[in-house]
Image (cartoon, rainbow, N blue to C red):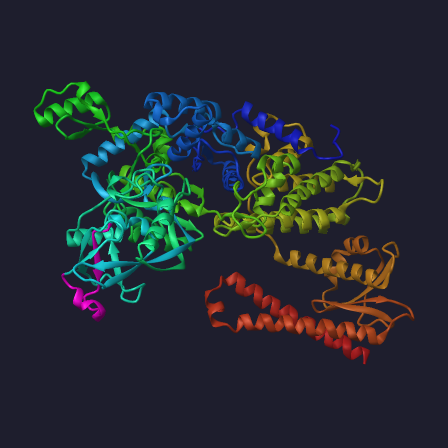
Amino acid sequence: MSISSKYDPSQAEAKWYAYWMEHKLFSSKVDYSKEPYTIVIPPPNVTGVLHMGHMLNNTIQDVLIRRARMQGKNACWIPGTDHASIATETKVVQLLKEKGIDKKDISREDFLKHAWEWKEKYGGIILEQLKKLGASCDWDRTAFTMDPGLSDAVNSVFVDLYRKGKIYRGIRMVNWDPKGQTALSDDEVFMKEVASKLYYIKYKIEGSENEYLTIATTRPETIMADSAICINPNDPRFTHLKGKKAIIPLINRSVPIIEDEYVDMEFGTGCLKVTPAHDLNDYELGVKHRLEVIDILNDDGTLNEKAQILVGEDRFVARKKIGKLLEEAGQLEKIEDYKSNVGHSERTDAVIEPKLSLQWFLKMDEITKPAFKAVMDDIIQLHPPKFKNMYRVWMENVRDWCISRQLWWGHRIPAFHLPNGEFVVAKTAEEALQLANEQFNANFTLEDLKQDEDVLDTWFSSWLWPISVFDTDVFTTGKPNEDLKYYYPTNDLVTAPEILFFWVARMIIAGYEYMGDKPFRNVYLTGIVRDKLGRKMSKSLGNSPDPLELIAQYGADGVRTGMLFSSPAGNDLPFDEKLVEQGRNFANKIWNAFRLVKGWEVDANLDGSANDASIEWFENRFQQALAEINDHFEKFRISDALMATYKLVWDDFCSWYLEMIKPAYQQPIDQKTYDQTIAFFEGILKVLHPFMPFLSEEIWHQIQERSVEESLILASWPSQTSFDEKIIEEAAQVFEVVSQIRNLRASKGMSPKEALDLTINSKNPDLYARFESVLTKLANLSSLNFAEKVENAMSFVVKADECFIPMGDSINVEEEKANLQKELEYTKGFLATVMKKLSNERFVNNAPAQVVETEKKKQADAEAKIKALEDSLAKLG
C-alpha cells in the first residue's frame, strides 16, 4: 500500500466516518456481559448550528466515549435536540413575518404546522454538523424533546406532580419578557449593568401648599402605578408626615404615606414610592400593607389605560416623555447619571418586567432535598469541585419554579378549564372529561373543555432527559424497561456551568423523584470559549470562527486537539487559531513519523542488539506516560491527558526514540527493532484515538489490512503494567548530555557533522556504556571515554557528572569559568525554590506522597549538581 506524502484530513474523515456508520460501530445494545458506559448529550436547540462551545463540549464527550469503548465497556452516547420553546417560536415568528404573515392573524394549529415544517427542514442541521467533528453517537437512538413518547412523558410527570400537590396555579410576581411575551423562571434572567438615570421627583403633600417629598427613581414611567409612599418610622425627617397622603404628579391621585423599616434611610432621598404591580419588593410591601395593585403595562411593554397618560407608548419612550412632562410641571428636581443592574431575558435580551401573572408553579422546597444532598455528599461529583459551592447557594435559596410559558410551540399544559371556572388536570381531554364529571357531579361534554393555552418551560422536558431517552413509559408505569435498568444511572455529563441550575440540578431532582437514584455520577463543567481579548465568542460580536470552516482548513483532529490544548475543566478557553494550527501540525508530525517507519527496508539477518537499550527505555516510558494519562482521565483532567499524550508522541517517540533506532541513510533496519517500533506505534495510536479518531484509524489500517472487528475504534485500550523509573531517569540523563553537546556545537559554531570525543567523569559509567550507541549516534561522537579530568576541554555538568569535550588550544578558561558560575547560580536558585516548598509543612503534609518524593529527588539532584559544578570551578583555578 503506497503512503501519500501528505496527510489529507478531508479524505480520511469522509472515509472513516462512513465506515464507522456503515458497520454500526457507534451502536449500543443491552449486554449484561459488559459494563455500560453512558453519556447523554446536552441536547442543543433544534434551531441551532454548531458553535465553538458545542465543539469543545462534544469533543470532550467523544474523547470519553471512545476511550470507554476501547476499555471494553458498552459505550452508549445518546444524541438529540431540544425543542427550545422561546428560541424556536421567535425564529418561526420571524420567518412568518418575512412571508407577510403575523402570528396574531393565524390560529395556533396553523402556527404549529409552520413550526413543524421548519423543524423537519432545518432541525437536524446541528446533529449532521457534529458528525463532521467525529462524534461517535448512537444515531439510531436520536431523540427530540417533542417526540411523541417524550411528550407523553412530560404530560405524565405534570399530572403526577400536580396530583402529589407539588404543582399549583396562582397569581405571583414573575419575570416577564415583553419581547417574547412570556413568563421566565429566575434562572432565565441575567443581570446586566446599564447606564441609567436617577430621576428626583417631587410629590406634593396633600393639604399642604408648598411641602413636597422628593423621591429618587430610575423608573418614572411607573409613577402612575404607585399605591403608596413609604418612609422609615425611625427617620426623624419624616415623623410629621405619619398618617398623611401624597399626590402623584401628572395624574393628581392621592396615595397614603406608610411606614416600614424596609426603607433604606441612606439611599436616594430616604423615602420610597411603592408600585406593587411592577416591583417584587414593592409587591411584598403591598401585601403586607394591603395596598392596591395597579398594573399599567400591557404584555408587550406598552402603557395601558390604567396609566391614564401616554397610553400605548412603549415603556422606554414613556420614560423619556414623563421626564419632560415632570420638568414642565415643575415636579422634577434633578436627573443624575446612574449605573444599575437590570434583569434581561436570557433568550431575547429584552429588559425584564416584574409582573403579577397567573402562572403554573412547581414547589421546590421539598423536591430539591435529595438532589441537594447528592451533590453535597459527593454521590454526584462536580468537576472541578469549585462549582459545588455555587450549587449549594442556589439550592439553599431556590424559589418555586414558574413552569408555564405564554407560547404556542412546546408541550401544552395538560390542564382543562371548565364552564364553572374550575379546571382539571389529566393527560387527555377524554380523561379530563371523566374526571371533571366525577369531581363536580356534572354532565360536561368535550366541547365544554378548554385546554390551557400555555406551554411548559422547555427545561420541564429536558430535566427528564437521562430517563426519557431510554424509557418514556416509566413515568406512568413506575417500572423501568430493560434499557433504563441497564443504562441508568448514566456515567458522565459534560455541560456548561451556565446551565448548572437550568438543567443539571433539575435533572438530579427528577432522577431522585422518579428513579430514586442519581441520573449520572460525574458532571464535567467546561469553560467558556473566549477570544484573545477575553470576550465570549458569539455571532453578535462577530468574534467566533465558523467551526466547519476550521475543520475544512485544519482537519477535525487538528480542531479537536487545538480546542483541548488549553481547556482545563471549569476554566475558560482563550481560543487562538494558532492552537488549531498546532493541532494540525501534530497530525502532520504523526503522519510523517509513520511514513518514516514504513519507508524503512527490513533485513531479517541484521543484529539489532544495539537498539536494546532504546527499546527498553521506550517500553518503560510508554508505561509511565500511560499511567499519567489514565490518572488524568480518572480525575477528568482531559486537557492534561492530551498534553501527556502529545509529549509522549512528539518528544519521546518522534524526537528521541525514532532518532535513536533510525538506520543510517539508505541502510536497512533489523526485523526485531522494526517489529517493536510498529508495536510501539500501535500503542501510541490507541492512546491517540480518543483525541484524533480519524488520523489514528487511517494509520491503523495502513499499518496492515484489518477486518471491521479489528478496527481501532474497537481495539483494546493499552494495558497498564509496571515500569522501571530508573531506566527512564538514566535515559533522560543521556538525553541531557546529547542536548548539551548540541548546544555547545551551536554556541561554538561547530558543524554537526564533526565527530567529537566525549569524556565523562561519572561514578556510574555503566549508564553511559549501556546507551553508548545512542550517544554516539545522536551526539555524533568519535569516542566515549571515562576519566576524572581532561585538559583544554569545554565542560558541562549533568546531574553530578562532569562531561568534557577536548577543544585543543582554543579553550577560553575565563569564558568557561563564567559559564560554570552562571550555571551554578541558576542551580542554587532552583534548589532554593525546591527547599522553600519542602520547608512548607502544609505542602509536605497535604501533597500526594509521590509529589513530595519528586521534590526531594529534585533536591538531591540539584545538590549533586552544585557539588560537581563547584568541583569543576575549583579545577579551573
Q: Residue furthest left?
A: 441
Give the residue at x 35% y 46%: 318
Left or right: 207, with 860 as reference point: left
Whether residue 601 appears in magenta in the rendering, the answer is no
Give the residue at x 50% y 63%: 849
Q: Where the C terminus falls, by quadrant?
A: bottom right
Q: Where the N terminus falls, by quadrant?
A: top right
Q: Quadrant of residue 607?
A: top right
Left or right: 861, with 374 as reference point: right
Left or right: 153, with 651 as reference point: left
Task: Mark yes or no: residue 676 visible.
Answer: no
Percent x, y for residue 214? 28, 61
For the image, the number of numbered tags is 0
Q: Quadrant of residue 200?
A: bottom left
Q: Compared with residue 535, is residue 1 higher up or lower down, i.e. above or below?
A: above
Q: Compared with residue 213, is residue 655 higher up or lower down, i.e. above or below?
A: above
Q: Residue furthest bottom?
A: 877
Left or right: 769, with 711 as reference point: right
Task: Mark yes or no: residue 782 visible.
Answer: yes
Percent x, y for residue 609? 76, 47
Query: Which of 96/619 is in front?
Result: 96
Q: Quadrant of residue 97?
A: top left
Whether residue 236 appears in magenta in the rendering, the answer is yes
Percent x, y for residue 635? 48, 50
Q: Which residues are magenta?
A: 226-243
Give the residue at x 46% y 69%: 842
Q: Residue furthest right?
A: 809
